[in-house]
Amino acid sequence: MNFSIIEIASNQTDYRIIVPVSMIFAITAIIITSCLLIIVILTKKLHTVTHLLTCNTCLASILYCIVQCNNYIYLLMIISNKSDQSCRWRGYFGYISIVAFIYSYVLQVISRLFFVVFHTKYRWLITYRVHFYLIFIGWIIIFILPLPAILTNDIYFREGELCWVTRSYELHTYYTIIVYYVIPIVLIIIINIIVFMRIRSNRKNIRIQYNRKRKDRDYIIFRNIMISLSVYFLGGIPLTIYMLTSIEFFYPIGIISVSIAVTMEKLVIIYLDRDIRILIKNYFCQNNARIIPVRINVPFIIHR
């Protein structure tokens, strides 16, 4: 999802086709995400630490979609605004939205680490208060990391192009690659390996009759990790290929793939979260149920 590492070739890219498609997926993601937030907020059963972090990811996704739609509107509709400073701020918030979405996954795996590895010795780590602090600190970091976008002149207005750092600024480019993409990926992989290895080691201490249940839990956790990482990588693959090969074909696909990835990530949440899935299923089943009136002929007896 590293938009920052690409140098846009506006003469070869028709944004009039790319932008509407990307915005359709972004708006779809906003609608799905908003429904998820409403479901979690209104359902007391879902007021858990896990769903708190899910809501944090949802907010980051909404921020990402709104910011990208705003950038697209400036690109195609508000063409009279040619201010470099305005472009820097759009780039800054664009980077914030990318970092927020990616690092929300980092918070989720850190929470998983607390629950699986440290919950017996440090039970305070799995409390609501700690996770609120974790989210708060996470958002402070999210707003700090993209500061080079507005503290330098590496982003400037370019006719017909999005406001990102081009590859001509190598230091800033390497910073965005490492901080916005490489570091969170490495953290997610390392923490997930630690969590999974701990789960497997714990199996040896469980009685035989619980082995099957434990195996199922291992599989579910491993499956969720793989699916989450797959969705995470999905949006950045075409742009990464473009960066490495400079093949223009992958650039427009990369712009659309990010919005698709955000939308798919929300559908994955619904699929993986059993409680949310059951609530949604029950809601639609109730709406589809029809009440058929039955006519009963009751004889009346008149007493004289």
Image: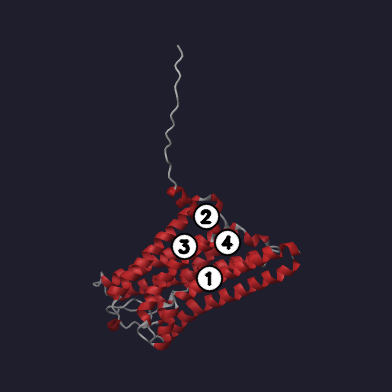
Marks 4 and 3 sit apart, C-alpha to C-alpha, by: 16 Å
Amino acid tagged 2: Ile
> Mark 1 or mark 3: which is in front?
1
* Disc number for residue 227: 1
Image quadrant occupied by the N terminus:
bottom left
What residue is pinned by disc 2?
278
Decide which of tag 4 and tag 3 comes sooner along the chain.
3
Label 2 packing within 10 angstroms: few (<14), some (14-19), many (20+):
few
Provide residue 138's location: percent of width, then percent of height. Answer: 52, 67
Marks 2 and 4 sit apart, C-alpha to C-alpha, by: 26 Å
What residue is pinned by disc 4?
131
What residue is pinned by disc 3?
58
Decide which of tag 1 and tag 3 comes sooner along the chain.
3
Label 1 residue SS:
helix
Decide which of tag 4 and tag 1 comes sooner along the chain.
4
Marks 1 and 2 sit apart, C-alpha to C-alpha, by: 20 Å
State whether residue 118 appears in this view. no
